[in-house]
Amino acid sequence: NAGVTQTPKFRILKIGQSMTLQCAQDMNHNYMYWYRQDPGMGLKLIYYSVGAGITDKGEVPNGYNVSRSTTEDFPLRLELAAPSQTSVYFCASRPPGASTDTQYFGPGTRLTVL
Amino acid sequence: DAKTTQPPSMDCAEGRAANLPCNHSTISGNEYVYWYRQIHSQGPQYIIHGLKNNETNEMASLIITEDRKSSTLILPHATLRDTAVYYCIVRANSNYQLIWGAGTKLIIKP
């Protein structure tokens, strides 16, 4: 298994541009998550999904959108990029079953908005 | 807001046990304690979790006080590769509510 994969690894955007951060997992996990991590801080949840076709907002959803058309993929869309969205973005997945919350993380996408 | 309190940094000598404390005085009865770590520039990695009892796995041991208001993560024989930021997280049994604090930066010294 490749686990959780994310593309791209790095990206520089200009203010007002848009882009999609890709996330895929091959573990048949139904839960998937998008986090952002600012320097020296912990992770903040942006959006999450409990299965294909179902998404919901986390702590910091403004400026982002997600979709979940398949179990494997959970892309994060940035519309009208702003400098405040400069961060490292992590995607994670979790196997079914509500008794634990063992999340598996991707390697991250480092985004800079200038 | 983070529901846990951890020291910002700690040092430990290579080969010794690293004991990382965490206070979670407002923890409720159904909230688990989770530990993750993040090696520089990588995604976080799950270490261990517990509810009431002490837990041990191949990576670490988790000691939870009887009143559940604090816990300690123990890395029994720390190596240089254990240098990372360690996050203590409490979570209710829900879909997503992992609240990440700033963690403890653990530096293992040769």
Image (cartoon, rainbow, N blue to C red):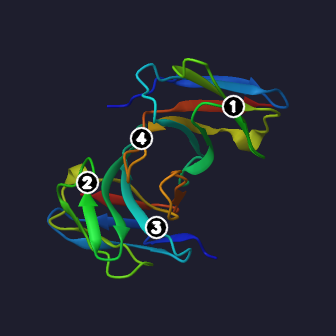
Mark 4 residue type: Ala
Report which residue position mark 4 lands on. Answer: B92
Q: CA distance from mark 4 to mark 1?
A: 18 Å
Residue A97 vs residue A19: left or right? right
Report the quarter where the N terminus of chain B lies: top left
Read off the residue under disc 3: A9
Discs 3, 4: same chain: no
Question: The residue under label 1 is which amino acid type?
Answer: Asn
Q: Secondary structure at mark 1?
A: loop
Residue identified by numbered label 2: A85
Residue B105's place in the image compared with B10, above or below, is: below
Disc marking residue B54: 1
* Left/right of residue A59 with respect to residue B99 in the rendered view: left
Residue ID at (51%, 51%):
A101
Q: Quadrant of residue B25?
A: top left
Q: Which mark is residue B4?
A: none
- Rendered position, B61 above or below A54: above
- Earlier in the chain: of badge 3 and badge 2, it is 3
Front residue of B75 and A51: A51
Q: Residues within 10 Å of mark 2 (few under 14, many from 20)?
A: some
Q: Nearer the viewer, mark 4 or mark 2?
A: 4
Are marks 4 and 1 in one subunit? yes
